[in-house]
Amino acid sequence: MTRPLKDKQFVLATDLDGTFLGGSEDDRRRLYDWIEANRDTIGLVFVTGRDPGFIAELCEGGVPWPEYAIGDVGTTIARIDGGRVTPIPELEAEIEAAWGDAGPRVRDALDGHPGLTLQPTEFRYRVSFDLDPHAFDDSAITRVRDMGLDALISDNRFFDVLPRGVSKGPSLRRFVDHQGIDDRRVLAAGDTLNDASMLESGLPAVAVGGAEPALLDRLEGLPHVHRATAIGAAGILEAVAALSLHPLPEGERFP
């Protein structure tokens, strides 16, 4: 049986697109092989805007399975076991309460709004849109706030409506506390604005090379955030070395 995350030397809490899935094929393989070779000492948590179905499909295609996933931009907190994604009710209770049954209201309020195209997937506790920055009317942000919800724009192409106060960062902190993990042994990794709240959460963090400039601006002056020069997966390994979180494979060197 795999040991609990709290007993592992290092826990990687990582975004997917542009971060864990970013960089060259060789860089990704180095990272993935290193994790698989050290499962007894390394814990893996995906913190992503993607939904559980995507995560399962991804891992069935050869990406390492995480033990847990914080998906749907922080609105899903789930255990991953044998390919099954099981939400953790005690961690999702506050999220569910903050959302209520807001989905139909949000879709009605933003139907036809300039620059927003509703994504076809119906999520449990969020509504997501593709964003056209040239056509977008930012009155949508005020409209969402007036509904008692939060709006989040990331990578200048996604618009998410979330429960008030819920995003990747608060959900990751709730998860780390619930699991009893020592903050100093966690690395939060990301590359776009929807990762900002987890990189700002006070946990050791890395903005990988190639990160969204707006994210880097927002993180300016935060001493716990490593700004990697290496892209995507290689940036994660760079941060592990820079912060001395876990031994790397023999011969692995970073500036």
Image (spheres, rainbow, N blue to C red):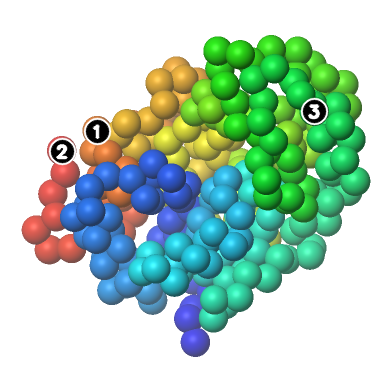
The residue that mark 1 highlights is: 229
* Element class at badge 2: loop
Residue 238, label in figure: none
Work out whether mark 1 precedes mark 2 in sequence or the reverse, and give the earlier one: 1
Residue 43, percent from left and from top:
45, 65
Residue 140, percent from left and from top:
75, 19
Residue drawn at (68%, 46%), measured in percent from left and top?
120
Residue drawn at (47%, 25%), measured in percent from left and top?
215
**In the picture shown, does residue 92 fall above or below 219?**
below
Residue 111, label in figure: 3
Residue drawn at (43%, 56%), measured in percent from left and top?
12
Work out whether mark 3 precedes mark 1 in sequence or the reverse, and give the earlier one: 3
- Answer with the quarter of the image where residue 144 lies: top right
- Foreground label between 2 and 3: 3
Type of amino acid at the residue the image marks with label 1:
Thr
- Foreground label between 3 and 1: 3
143 or 31: which is nearer to us?
143
**Label 1 neighbour load within 10 Å: few <14, some 14-19, many 20+:** some
Instruction: List the single residue furthest toward the front.
Output: 112
Q: CA distance from mark 2 to mark 3?
A: 49 Å
Quadrant in which the C terminus is drawn: top left
Type of amino acid at the residue the image marks with label 3:
Asp
216 or 179: which is nearer to us?
216
Is any atom of residue 203 visible in this view?
yes
**In the picture shown, does residue 59 fall above or below 223?**
below
The residue that mark 2 highlights is: 255
In the figure, is residue 29 to the left or right of 84? left
- Answer with the quarter of the image where residue 139 lies: top right
Question: What count of labels does the image hold?
Answer: 3
